[in-house]
Amino acid sequence: MGDDRFQFLLAQANAFFDSAERDMVAEKAAAIVEIKALMAEHQLSLDDLQD
């Protein structure tokens, strides 16, 4: 495999992992919004979540 081809594939892999990481950040943010909404709906506090 030539160096140019290797660099191209490496760039593609990096782009893939960058987009996957951004998706995880977005999913985490969406989950937090959903949790906060559910807590408000059910009038729960952080103390309610403690065992």
Image (tube, grey):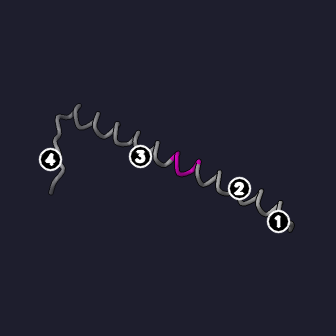
Q: What residue span does the magenta drawing correspond to?
A: 19-23
Q: Distance between the residues labelled 2 and 3?
A: 26 Å
Camera-side mark, 4 or 1: 1
Q: What residue type is labelled 2?
A: Ala
- Label 2, on which residue? 11
Residue 50, quarter of picture: bottom left
User: Local crowd at mark 4 within 10 Å, few (<14), some, or many (≥20)?
Assistant: few
Most distant residue in the top direction: 41
Comes first in the chain, label 4 or label 1: 1
In the foreground, 20 or 7 = 7
Which residue appears at 52% of the width and 45% of the height?
23
Q: Which amino acid does label 4 sit on?
A: Asp
- Label 3, on which residue? 28
- Label 4, on which residue? 48
- Label 1, on which residue? 3
Image side of residue 37 versus residue 27, left or right: left
